[in-house]
């Protein structure tokens, strides 16, 4: 097992609270971002959480994976929906690696001159 997700989630929430006590304005602003993203209700909670999981995968954030997977389950996401979300994230990440590989070749060509 990569992480003990049952222990990680409460640890993250506790640490998040501790940081909030030392910098409440920053946490308030951070929470406002989430509220603003959900404000227009164009996407339902499950869809927003599935997108959040995909982003968490591509940014390699274990805390985000745990928090948003938990929220997706609570919003009704199935294992199959989460797996499809992960396939999309893998596909996108491979595409990003391809594009950044082109940048490396471009850098080589520019620097070789």
Image (tube, rainbow, N blue to C red):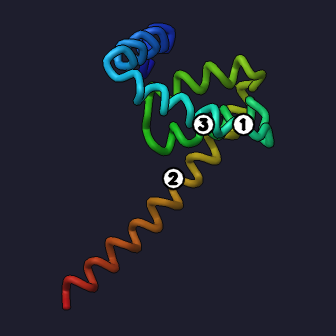
* Residue with the mark numbered 3: 52
Which of labels 2 and 3 is toward the front? 3
Residue 27, disc: none
Q: Which residue occupies the foreground of this view, 24 or 105?
A: 24
Q: Position of residue 56 (x, y in %)?
A: 51, 37
Relative placement, left or right, of 94 versus 110 is right
Q: Residue at x 40, y 30 (%)?
A: 26
Give the vertical position of 27 relative to 87 (above or below): above
State if disc 3 and disc 2 touch (CB < 8 Å).
no
Label 2: element kind:
helix
* Residue with the mark numbered 2: 93
Relative placement, left or right, of 86 versus 108 is right
Mark 3, residues whose alpha carbon is within 10 Å: few (<14), some, or many (≥20)? many
Which quadrant would residue 45 be assigned to in this image?
Answer: top right
Q: Residue at x 40, y 21 (%)?
A: 24
Q: Residue at x 75, y 22 (%)?
A: 75
State which quarter of the image contains the C terminus: bottom left
Which quadrant would residue 78 be assigned to in this image?
Answer: top right
Q: Gap in Å between the C-alphas at discs 2 and 3? A: 14 Å
Relative placement, left or right, of 65 versus 73 is left
Q: Which residue occupies the foreground of this view, 71 or 16?
A: 16
State which quarter of the image contains the N terminus: top left
Q: Position of residue 87 (x, y in %)?
A: 63, 44
Q: Position of residue 7 (x, y in %)?
A: 45, 8
State if disc 1 and disc 2 touch (CB < 8 Å).
no
Which quadrant would residue 61 be assigned to in this image?
Answer: top left
Q: Give the mark count.
A: 3
Of callouts 2 and 1, which one flags the residue occurring earlier in the amino acid sequence? 1
* Residue with the mark numbered 1: 39
Q: Residue at x 71, y 25 (%)?
A: 79
Label 3: element kind:
helix
């Amino acid at each position: 097992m990569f992480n003990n997700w049952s222990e990680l989630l409460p640890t993250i929430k506790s640490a998040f609270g501790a940081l909030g006590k030392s910098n409440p304005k920053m946490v308030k602003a951070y929470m406002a971002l989430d509220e603003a993203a959900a404000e227009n209700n164009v996407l339902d909670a499950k869809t927003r959480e599935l997108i959040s999981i995909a982003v968490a995968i591509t940014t390699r954030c274990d805390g985000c994976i745990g928090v948003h997977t938990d929220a997706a389950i609570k919003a009704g996401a199935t294992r199959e929906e989460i797996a499809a979300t992960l396939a999309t994230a893998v596909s996108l990440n491979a595409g990003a690696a391809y594009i950044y590989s082109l940048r490396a070749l471009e850098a080589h060509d520019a620097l070789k001159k």
